[in-house]
Image (tube, rainbow, N blue to C red):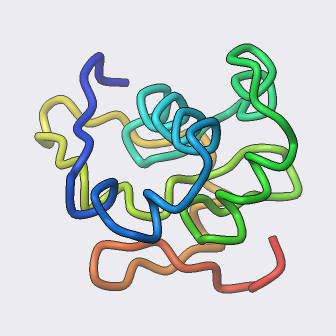
């Protein structure tokens, strides 16, 4: 997993993103910097509690489609590929291959194939 992450203004400078509470935005930033090289976060609820965000903040990110949660408890950053490009010699595939197979990549965004992760 890389030690650096990119945050794109194409995502965080939109009305959709900026209309969220500051706590939801902060949670998004923390999830993004802790994601693996495919955008998966293994312990999003721990991060949520660690930075003092509520369940509502997590739900807002889901409802606004900034993250996709899975039954296993992990989540993926929907716009990960739009914001981060990792050189192939530095890339480490996600350990969450089962969840990755439940996604489709469309125009740089992850979409759920099941619709009810």
Q: Nearer the viewer, residue 77 or 102?
A: 77
Does residue 47 appear to the left or right of 16 in the view shown?
right
Number of on-image labels: 0
Residue 35 appears left or right of 4: right
**Where 101 sits versus 73, above or below?**
below
Q: Residue at x 24, y 22 (%)?
A: 4
Vertically, is 52 above or below 103? above
Q: Residue 62 lies in what quarter of the image?
A: bottom right
Using the image, determine if residue 86 lies above or below residue 43: below
Residue 26 pos. (x, y %): 53, 33
Q: Position of residue 66 (x, y in %)?
A: 54, 62
Q: What's the residue at 75%, 48% (across, down)?
A: 58
For the residue pair 35 and 53, the one nearer the viewer reads as 53
Q: Quadrant of the C terminus?
A: bottom right
Where's residue 2, x and y in %? 29, 23
Residue found at x 50% / y 42%: 94
In this rendering, the answer to whether 80 lies above or below 112 is above
Q: Quadrant of residue 3?
A: top left
Task: State the quadrant of the N terminus.
Answer: top left
Q: Is residue 36 left or right of residue 114?
A: left
Query: Which residue shows up at 52% across the image and 28% down it?
Result: 30
**Residue 78 x, y percent position in the rendering:** 49, 63
């Amino acid at each position: 997993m890389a030690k650096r992450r990119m945050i794109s203004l194409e995502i965080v400078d939109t009305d959709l993103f900026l209309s969220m509470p500051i706590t939801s935005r902060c949670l998004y930033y923390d999830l993004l910097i802790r994601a693996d090289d495919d955008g998966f976060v293994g312990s999003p609820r721990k991060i949520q509690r660690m930075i003092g965000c509520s369940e509502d903040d997590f739900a807002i990110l889901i409802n606004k489609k900034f993250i996709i949660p899975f039954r296993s408890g992990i989540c993926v950053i929907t716009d990960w590929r739009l914001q981060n490009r990792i050189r192939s010699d530095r890339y480490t595939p996600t350990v969450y291959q089962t969840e990755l197979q439940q996604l489709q990549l469309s125009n740089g965004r992850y979409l759920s194939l099941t619709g009810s992760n």
